[in-house]
Amino acid sequence: MIVLILEKVPSGLRGEISRWMIEPRAGVFVGNLSAAVRDRIWEKAEKSARGGAGMLIHNAKNEQGFDMRTFGDTTRSIVNVEGLWLVQLTTKQT
């Protein structure tokens, strides 16, 4: 299974991705795709985001059973600590 979360991206990009995956909530896509299709969709999202952000979560053969990727500026970042993925909340300092 694959979960793709997009923030602040053009609606055309969301429409294009919805051809391959379902969008149960705005900017959240879920599907079961091959690794090749998953990687092509990820590349397309990165290139077409226009300043937006994204996170991809997919099955992997590791302790947690999944892998993660991100691009862009989000309020949450992922950190790999000794092989475990953790989510870190970032706060903007003024």
Image (cartoon, rainbow, N blue to C red):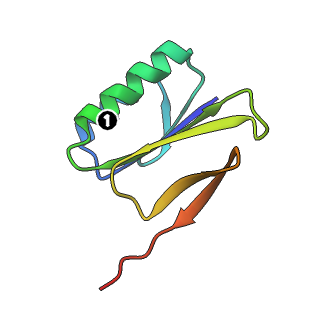
In the image, is residue 41 above or below residue 52? above
- Relative image position of residue 82 (x, y in whole percent): 70, 48
- Relative image position of residue 1 (x, y in whole percent): 64, 29
In the image, is residue 77 above or below residue 58? below
Q: Amino acid at mark 1?
A: Glu
Residue 5 appearing in the image: no
Circle 1 sits in a helix, a strand or a loop, which is it? helix
Q: Horizontally, is 25 left or right of 85 in the view?
A: left
Name which residue lies at 57% across and 54% down.
Answer: 79
Residues 12 and 33: in front is 33
Snapshot quadrant of residue 86: bottom right
The mark tally for this picture is: 1
Name which residue lies at 39% across and 59% down.
Answer: 74
Kindly identify which residue carries mark 1: 46
Name which residue lies at 31% across and 35% down.
Answer: 46
Q: Horizontally, is 16 left or right of 29 in the view?
A: left
Residue at the extreme right: 63
Q: Residues within 10 Å of mark 1 (few under 14, many from 20)?
A: some
Residue at the extreme left: 50
Q: Horizontally, is 36 left or right of 65 in the view?
A: left
